[in-house]
Amino acid sequence: MWNVWIATCATTAAVTVPAAFVLDLPSTNRIAFELIVTAMFGVDALLTWRAGDSASDALLIPGFSRAPQLAVDLLAAVPFGLLTGWPLLQVLRLLKLQRVAQLFRLWRFNEIRRTAVLRLVFFLYWMALLTHWLACGWIALRGSAPESGNFHRYVSGLYWCITTLSTVGYGDITPENDVQRLYAMATMMLGVGVYGFIIGNVATILANLDPGRVSRLHRMEQLSTFMAYRNIPPALRDRIGGYYRHLWQRRLDHDETEIISQLPPGLRTDVTLFLKRDLLQAVPMFREAGDGFLREIALEMKPVVFMPGDYVIWAGDHGREMYFISRGTVEVLSPEDGVTVLNRLSQGDFVGEMALLEDAPRSASVRAVDYCDLYRLDAHLFENILAAHPTIAAEIRAKAQARRSTPGSPPG
Ligand code: CMP
């Protein structure tokens, strides 16, 4: 809060110091303001000096050393302009803007959401200050009559500055002598640079505002080029489109593996537990299982999506994995005719355990009824988990036994 307060004082000083040269600001208010700023900057200089290296850590000041920092802080704190009678020395106050830059750096470092928006805000801040200074400079050079009023003089200066900086230049306010012409030329040159900088920055910031959307659009373009190039039939195109729609609706398209793999082990497990919480809460036996078991299984289960009509399991195949249903419904089809529905299973249920338990071919086919989000558990991990958690193993075995003894249980 202190840093924010000092940054606010520094900003106010950066606005009022140049404005005081060219506008008629009430002097009593100014003296009071200068006193407050001197006190605040003085206290801050002292605090930063006392904090030493910890201030450098806290504010992320690169190459921090105490003495130069104290010098900068004191130059900004002491009202040299008022003490010496050279008002121009008041500009030294602007050195305190260093604190604003530090604060912005810190903010960007700590804030991992909305980084692009923050960049835009910081950029606008510096642009606004620069425009204000240039406008004050123009008013000083123009020396317009004080009777015209502060507001009018400032608005005219700002207007000239913005039209010149933005390279619009209507030409209704034009330089009248060489000094003004030189100032106008310098502002125009600055404007060209700033203009390019703004366009480039804003374009990058806007492009990065929603990287998810950008990568999705890119994927869509790649897909449609591929489908057109390879003459994919319309029915298949519809299915591909449907698959991606489902992924985006369920927010499953983000490639999280790399991001998660960069986290330290403890955090990686916690994030994985959070991402798979829908499944872990849906499966009754998981709910009763201990923390250790959940952590173990959450890391091992891989999400897979099946579309309506897709076969999750084919009867007679060799079993290498089992599936937990996170969302959607599957139907178990009779191995005899492949049509009769033996059972319907949905969220919280599992399939494919029998082949793994008995080391036998798949006892039935399993087909997705709608879009199904399943989690796959590979056979060797399944065995490890059975060996380590006997109660869970007993439950899975009991369920497999029940399914075997009542193969034709009604759907529902
Ligand atoms: P598995 O034999 O590996 O492959 C087919 C799966 O369908 C089987 O494991 C069980 O998970 C499931 N299954 C088989 N018969 C039934 C049933 N009657 N009710 C529910 N699920 C079943």
Image: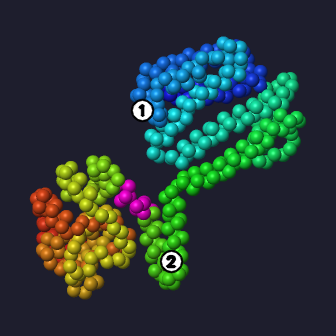
Residue 134 position by quadrant: top right
Q: Marks 2 and 1: CB-CB under 8 Å?
A: no
Q: Position of residue 218 (x, y in %)?
A: 52, 66
Whether residue 48 is visible: no
Crowding near pointer 1: few (<14 within 10 Å), some, many (20+)? few
Label 2 vs label 1: CA separation? 51 Å
Which residue is tagged 2? 226
Which numbered dot is residue 337?
A: none
Q: Amino acid at mark 1?
A: Asp
Q: Amino acid at mark 2?
A: Phe
Crowding near pointer 2: few (<14 within 10 Å), some, many (20+)? few
Q: Which residue is at a point 20% across and 79% down the rendered structure image?
A: 318
Q: Which residue is at a point 40% across and 28% down the rendered structure image?
A: 54
Above or below, 113 relative to 23: below
Q: Nearer the viewer, mark 2 or mark 1?
A: 1
Which residue is tagged 1? 57
Q: Position of residue 63 (x, y in %)?
A: 47, 34
Q: Depth check: 200 or 398 in front?
A: 200
Question: Residues in magenta?
Answer: 249-260
Residue 286 position by quadrant: bottom left
Is the residue marked 1 within 8 Å of ligand 1, measured from its CB? no
Mark 1 element type: helix
**The C terminus lies in quadrant:** bottom left
Is the residue marked 2 within 8 Å of ligand 1, measured from its CB? no
Whether residue 299 is visible: yes
Whether 150 is among the magenta residues is no
